[in-house]
Amino acid sequence: MTGSEIRARFLEYFRRRGHTVVRSSPLVPAQDPTLLFTNAGMVQFKSAFLGEERREYVRAASAQKCVRAGGKHNDLENVGRTARHHTFFEMLGNFSFGDYFKEDAIRFCWELLTKEFGLPKDRLKATVFTDDDDAFALWKQIAGLSDDRILRLGEKDNFWAMGDTGPCGPCSEVHFHQGDHLPCAEEKAGRVCLGPACECDRWLEIWNLVFMQFNRDASGRMTPLPKPSIDTGMGLERIAAVLQGKMSDYDTDLFAPLIARVSTLAGKTYRAREEDDVSMQVIADHARAATFLITDGVTPSNEWRGYVLRRIMRRAMRHGRMLGLEAPFLWDVTGSVVAVMGDAYPEIREAHPRVVETVRQEEERFAETLDLGMAKIREYVDAHRGDAQRVVDGRFLFTLYDTHGFPSDLAQEVLQDAGFTVTPETQQTFDAEMEAQRERARAGASFGAGEPGDPTVAIYQQLGSQLAKPQFLGYASLAAPARVLALVADGQRRREARQGETVEIILDRTPAYAESGGQQGDTGLMVGREGQGTIQDTYYRGGQLIVHRVAVTQGHLREGEEVAVSVESHRRQGLRQHHTGTHLLHAALRRVLGTHVAQAGSLVAPDHLRFDFSHGASVKDGEVEAVESLVNEQVQANIVVSPAEMDLKEALKSGAMALFGEKYGDRVRVIRIGDFSTELCGGTHLDATGQIGLFKVTDEGAVASGVRRIEAVTGEHALAHVGREEAALRESAGLLKIPPLELPRRLAALLEDQKRLEKQLAQLETKLARGQAQDLVAAAREVAGVPVLAARLDGLDPDGLRSVMDTLRDRLPSGVIVLGSAVDGKVSLVAAVSKDLMKRFPAGRLVQEVAKMVGGGGGGRPDLAQAGGKDASKLDEALATVAAWVERMAQG
Ligand SMILES: [Zn+2]
Ligand SMILES: [Zn+2]
């Protein structure tokens, strides 16, 4: 049975049993910004399990794409070295939201495994949680398993919890017997193999059933859930290996074509040499992860998700080198990923050109880094060849990273392969160097636009190290008392500032928001004991100092004094409206255009917003409308905007924090707008979406390749925008004396009329010109015995000219005629020569000669030819040459 068949039969089995088959959610979780990647089937159903959301179904099944990278359960370094660790994998699962419980879950599981998939019963065992007598009895009754084939295991193996509080409950697993001939560490140590509870390969866990039965509160007490639920998970790669009789996931048809491709590119045989196998497996696994992550909108970078992707790709590239692949190759392997999985996940086929481009670029960039870094590592290895204890120095890793951008984890791996040890001290030294580097960066880099040597920069450098980060009060209040800590003007610290001066003022606390995250800084008022000033802007300097630019309007403001600070509330309200509007827009874009949409830039001003986002195609009119109305639906639903402070370390599972660095700080602020939007954000927001009033898109366009921009307005500015459009509409309708709603129909009719009238006019002009033909004929001159006529008939198009020409040819049976006209600066020419003369005076050559003078060209038959030109100012001169031309031709 192929991997694709297993996936299809799993879903079909549950569909027939009343389950709604739900598409895999994207790898970047839409509803949970603290989760690195979607890592289980239940992620997209979390709010349904928590009872926060009602769905149209109570039973669901899915094949979910998952990524696990980093963390103690899936160390990236293990991937490729074992038969079962993966960064990307698929999780098959069935779910019940307060519908069926243990009995059906166990029945479905057993029936699917033994009947549909045909696994022999005597190679299966079940495990249950120690106290779960229900599950024990059900396995006996439904599966007919004897007591010795049902193991009771403790909390570590068989109890599941969503978090410290919330839904939790016992689990039950099914294990498959791979054979007792396989090695077991317990047995080697003189003990007995523990069967399904053992770490060895003899028994393989294939399916985990979670019985969500209790709710745990903060005190740790568990109360039964009124409607218990089911969440199950079975790794597709693993069940495929079992059903295809393979001992390694990499030998299944899900991986084999990828490994074959790598093997071809590298010119190496698979299963010939262990180190090569590891490298091929690493590349196969990582090509899948890269393809799916890039498809779902992750791009390689030095931050968070982007960093994980970069790390995965770079590890694959390094293993490519170990196979002797010098040129970019990973992009090529993504083609095999699409070939194997494009039918089940059409999005990877659609995104493939983007995937190829992204991977190739990263490969080219990394090649340079790698060459340099590997040379440095070789030097280091040589220099320490004679050392008694070969321990990696953290400072060396830091230098590699800092000066050459060579990833420390990669360096560690290379050095370990070369026989070095990495100790906790290595990591500590590296971390300490990184911290010192960050300090230097904080002190130096982020002082605004100041030139090096600018005294203001030096002042803020000093202040930054002396002063604590000012407290921001502006989420809750718009006015507060505060103390003036420092005044800076003209590159100097000041004791005070007087009326007429503009200074930068730092306070110990402030309700004013400093420009960041795209949101503009606040303005307001600062009132002291003996003077006051207006706050013109608020921004960061020296890293985390909030600076108010104040124009002193009365008396003076002094260092050390207490001041009353207030924020201009109307402007702030505009900023809040546009910031919350930005979050709604972002979420709506992802829903309408797809989850590849990622923010590329954002401006939140009091009177408008601008949002740049990644999107490969142009945005159609209907899509803009759909986005706008989706946002306005959320506005009308008046959803509460709930900000929450969270501990990222806890929220991010295990190792993700280390990748995250300290960039966002340990505490993060999360803005949640119902189930519609969740973002990490430090900005100021509305209390509920209804306060936006109205959301209108004013402009949409491209800013760079693959990046689009939307400009929009909210609240009074949206109303004003609509008002202006309405006024223009009313004015137009007033001119036509019709109701505004009839405008489109009437305008269409008017345009139709205009076209018709223009045509009529042209016909009339032609008629008129033909009427003048008699006069024209009279104007013909004899040149070398040939009647020659050259005339200008402005306003006629080529059709009109030809029509007049027909009339003239009737009236002048023998002769040479050239007609010209100018319309909107463009010249048309027609030349005709009677049959008796056309050999001597070919019309085609004549018209070419004339057209040359008006900057154009043309041609035709000897009796009739036409041409065009661009320079109407030369038309008279050009027509005047006709006689001379005839003269010249006549003389031969
Ligand atoms: Zn064992
Ligand atoms: Zn925001």
Image: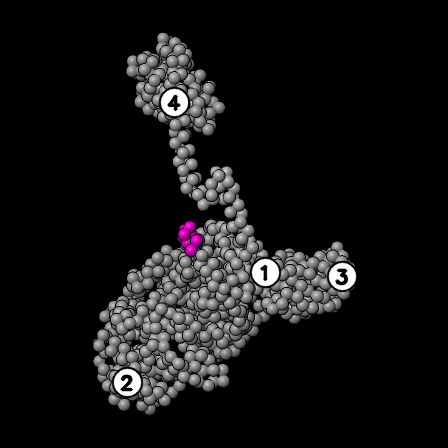
* Residue drawn at the location 48% of the way across and 24% of the way down: 873
Residue marked by disc 3: 531
SS at badge 3: strand
Give, as a three-letter code, the residue at label 1. Answer: Gln
Of the residues under marks 4 and 1, which one precedes in the sequence? Answer: 1
Of discs 3 and 4, which sits in the foreground? 4
**Residue sitting farthest toward the top:** 785
Q: Name the residue under label 4.
A: 766
Which quarter of the figure is the C terminus placed in? top left
Q: Tell me which numbered mark, 1 or 3, is placed earlier along the sequence.
A: 3
Residue corresponding to mark 2: 139
Where in the figure is residue 608, as x and y percent of width and height? 55, 54
Q: How many labels does the image show?
A: 4
Q: Badge 3: how crowded within 10 Å, few (<14), some, or many (20+)? A: some
Alpha carbon separation for disc pair 2 and 1: 61 Å
**Nearest-to-viewer mark from 1 and 3:** 1
Most common secondary structure along the magenta stretch? helix
Q: In this view, does 89 lie above or below 821?
A: below
Q: What residue is shown with label 1?
A: 573
Asked which secondary structure carries label 1, the reply is: helix
- The picture quadrant where one finds residue 118 is bottom left
Question: In 3D space, how far apart are the residues under numbered discs 3 and 4 (Cα atoms)?
Answer: 83 Å
Q: Would residue 170 be visible to someone looking at this image? A: yes
Q: Which residue type does callout 3 highlight? A: Gly
Q: Could you tell which of marks 3 and 4 lies nearer the N-terminus?
A: 3
Q: In this view, does 218 lie above or below 545?
A: below
Magenta range is 617-626
Question: Dot 2, crowdedness within 10 Å: few (<14), some or many (≥20)?
Answer: many
